[in-house]
Image: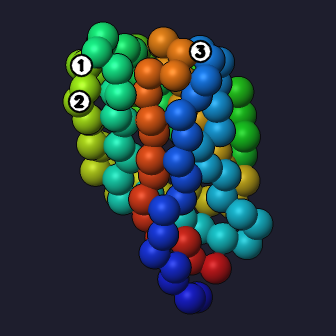
C-alpha cells in the first residue's frame, strides 16, 4: 500500500451550511493527522466538524467539535490521528459566513 502525505482538504465556507472538507476516495484508507481552523476575522466565530461514516448525515453523534468558539484572528489545531475509510466524509461548518478556514492534513493509503 503506497502512502501519500498531503493536504487532504481546504475550505472557507461562504455561508453557515455544512461544507465537505474531505471525502476518502474508493479503495483508500486515510489517517488525518491534523485539522486546523483559522478565524480570519476580528470577531469570534463558532465551528463544527463532523466525521461522517460512509457519508451518514452530520449529527451530534458524529461531531468531533460542536459550536466551539474560535477567537478573532486566531487558530485552533486539532492533532488527533483520526483513521477513516473509503467513503467517509469530513464535514465542516462555520457559525459566521466567510469567517473560518478549515484545513486537513494527513496520509492516504491505497
**Dot 1 and dot 2 residues touching (CB under 8 Å):** yes
List x then y, in percent, for residue 46.
Answer: 39, 15
Q: Which mark is residue 7?
A: none
Instruction: Please determine whether, in this image, residue 64 is positioned above or below residue 72.
Output: below
Residue bearing mark 1: 71
Name above or below for residue 11 compared with residue 46.
Answer: below
Alpha carbons under labels 3 and 1: distance apart: 17 Å
Q: CA distance from mark 1 to mark 2?
A: 6 Å
Q: Quadrant of the C terminus?
A: bottom right
- Quadrant in the picture for residue 93: top right
Name the residue at 36% across, 36% down: 37
- On the rendered structure, is 46 left or right of 28? left
Image quarter of residue 11: top right
Indicate left or right for 65 with 53 as reference. left
For the question of whether residue 85 can be seen, the reply is: yes
Q: Residues within 10 Å of mark 3 (few under 14, many from 20)?
A: some
According to the image, label 2 marks what residue?
74
Identify the secondary structure beneath mark 1: loop
- Looking at the picture, the colour scheme in use is rainbow
Asked if residue 61 shows in the view, the reply is no
**Quick one: SS at disc 3?**
loop
Q: Quadrant of the N terminus?
A: bottom right
Residue at image point 34% right, 27% down: 39
- Report the disc number at residue 16: 3
x, y percent for residue 47: 42, 22
Front-most of residues 27 and 18: 18
Q: Residues within 10 Å of mark 1 (few under 14, many from 20)?
A: some
Amino acid at each position: 500500500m503506497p502512502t501519500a502525505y498531503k493536504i487532504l482538504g481546504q475550505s472557507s465556507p461562504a455561508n453557515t451550511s455544512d461544507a465537505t472538507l474531505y471525502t476518502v476516495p474508493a479503495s483508500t484508507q486515510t489517517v488525518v493527522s491534523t485539522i486546523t481552523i483559522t478565524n480570519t476575522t476580528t470577531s469570534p466565530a463558532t465551528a463544527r466538524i463532523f466525521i461522517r461514516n460512509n457519508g451518514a448525515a452530520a449529527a451530534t453523534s458524529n461531531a468531533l467539535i460542536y459550536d466551539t468558539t474560535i477567537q478573532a484572528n486566531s487558530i485552533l489545531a486539532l492533532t488527533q490521528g483520526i483513521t477513516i475509510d473509503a467513503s467517509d466524509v469530513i464535514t465542516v461548518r462555520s457559525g459566521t459566513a466567510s469567517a473560518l478556514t478549515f484545513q486537513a492534513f494527513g496520509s492516504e493509503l491505497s
